[in-house]
Amino acid sequence: MNENITPYHSENATKKEQVATMFNNISGTYDFLNHFLSLGIDILWRKKAIRTLKSLQPRNILDVATGTGDFAFESIKILNPEKIVGVDISVGMLDVARKKIQERNLGHIFSVKLGDSEMLPFEDNNFDAITVAYGVRNYENLEKGLADMYRVLKPGGKIVILEFSKPKQFPIKQTYNFYFKHITPFFGRLFSKDARAYEYLPESVAAFPDGTAFTNLMETVGFNQTKQITLTFGISSIYTGIK
């Protein structure tokens, strides 16, 4: 599912390989453009998503598609876990994350490793909670990725996924589509080494099965009590589920 939407339309590389290349290319400007293009709202979205774990008080967290680590750093502030492991397919993004971990002196809590989100290098029933911010739409095989996260989550554990969704109401839908298709790629070209990355972004969001289609897929792999919480007129959504 969603495997046909790829960053570079290359027949010589899998979606997974193309996504890794794309994030390696944009790792240096990723944080700046995230906050700039979302007008800083992405920070509030992350905080709200992480707060859905407060009642669980997870001690051991896995942050999938951790990127530069922003979701994990916010989890440390809000949840005060004993340990967070971040996994990502991009060496460039992980290099930025490691630098930030060192600067903040958080190596005793937060570590990162290179890994495939569809074949996670962890034992079954290992983590109290799993978080993913803006990563699942980049999976080559979305169902396989969800199933593997289910595998490494402890029984009773919770998954929290933050992802773009598609607004339905006028005029938010039309404004959002114009911004995503024209404004985002313009600034992506201006500030990033990889203009194509910010053209791929709206394509990947449009192809992503959001809303009920996604919670149904979560339930297909075994998650219970699935829920969608829409944010800012439906621009983003928080999805949660229990093992």
Image (cartoon, rainbow, N blue to C red):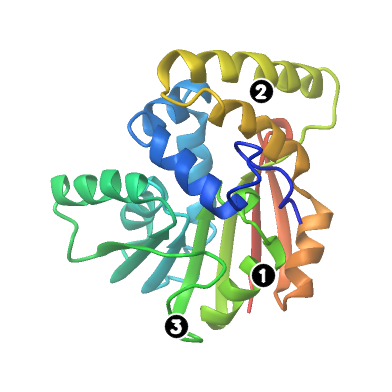
CB atoms of marks 3 and 2 within 8 Å: no
The residue lying at 59 percent from left, 74 percent from top is 148
Q: Residue at horizontal 42%, vertical 50%?
A: 71
Given the current orientation, which residue lies at the most extreme front position? 12
Taking 19 as reference, is 115 above or below it? below
Q: CA distance from mark 1 to mark 3?
A: 18 Å
C-alpha gap between disc 3 and disc 2 = 37 Å
> Between tags 3 and 2, which lies in front?
2
Q: Secondary structure at mark 1?
A: helix
- Residue 234: give x, y in percent of width and height: 73, 36
Q: What residue is shown with label 2?
A: 180
232 with respect to 175 (left or right): left
Tell me the residue that label 1 is attached to. 144
The structure residue drawn at horizontal position 54% and vertical position 31%, both measured from the top left corner, is: 197
Q: Secondary structure at mark 3?
A: loop
**9 relative to 210 in the view: left or right:** left
Which mark is on residue 126? Answer: 3
